[in-house]
Amino acid sequence: IDGSAQKKLGLKRVSGLGMNEKELMANSALSDWVVLDLNRGKQPKLPYDDSSFDVVLCQLSIDYLTSPLEVMQEVGRVLKPGGRVAIIFSNRLFIQKAVGLWTGADDIDHTYTVASYLRFSGGGFTNIKAEDLSTRKGKGKAQQIIGDPLYVVTAVRS
């Protein structure tokens, strides 16, 4: 989300959480940000109050989480009832950093895996849906076959 999208969507607050301080600092859309490695420590803990967000977006990072169920439980904790989560992922990744479960699976398996994280996390998620956002349009047969793979799994906190 950039600064213009924040205004267009009427967002009062956009919080960022990631591992790259320079990227977080450079993102003008963020109201606040935290540098945090969710793979460190025994129990991942999001540094936010209970029921403090309407929406949580996890973008291109689910494939690197070593405790995804615990992280999704935390997402459920920080979401308001009726709040939404969107987990966006691709099959383009740093293979040496991704978790083994992810590297040995295809896109359909990835989608089921992410949906399972939400369902079994204890985060109170319902209405779990998956969508293929891949671009398969363009010039040339390779672009039409391969495209740019992108998927999203969404859910609502009960």
Image: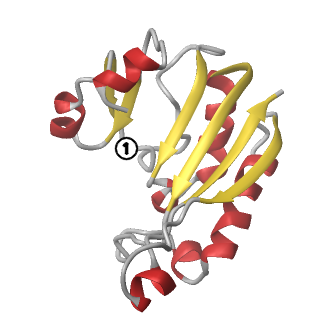
Q: Nearer the viewer, residue 72 or 26?
A: 26
Quarter of image, res 155 = top right
Q: Nearer the viewer, residue 145 or 12?
A: 145
What x and y, as percent, mark residue 43?
56, 41
Picture layout, residue 134 above or below residue 6 = below
What x and y, as percent, mark residue 59?
46, 48
Q: Quadrant of the C terminus?
A: top right
Amino acid on which the number 1 mark rests in the picture: Asp
What x and y, as percent, mark residue 66?
52, 58
Helix, strand or loop for disc 1: loop
- Identify the residue at horizontal 60%, vertical 42% (top origin): 86
What x and y, as percent, mark residue 82?
77, 22
Quarter of image, res 71 = top right
- Colouring chosen for the image of the structure: secondary structure
- Identify the residue at horizontal 45%, vertical 60% (top origin): 64
Q: Nearer the viewer, residue 101 or 134?
A: 134
Relative side of 71 to 127, left or right: left
Picture layout, residue 118 above or below residue 14 = below
Relative side of 5 to 149, left or right: left
The tally of labels here is 1
Identify residue for label 1.
37
Which residue sits furthest front?
A: 139
Picture layout, residue 69 above or below residue 18 = below
Q: Is disc 1 surrounded by few (<14), some (14 to 19) or many (20+) residues within 10 Å?
A: some
Quarter of image, res 84 = top right
Which residue sits furthest top?
A: 12
Picture layout, residue 88 above or below residue 44 = below
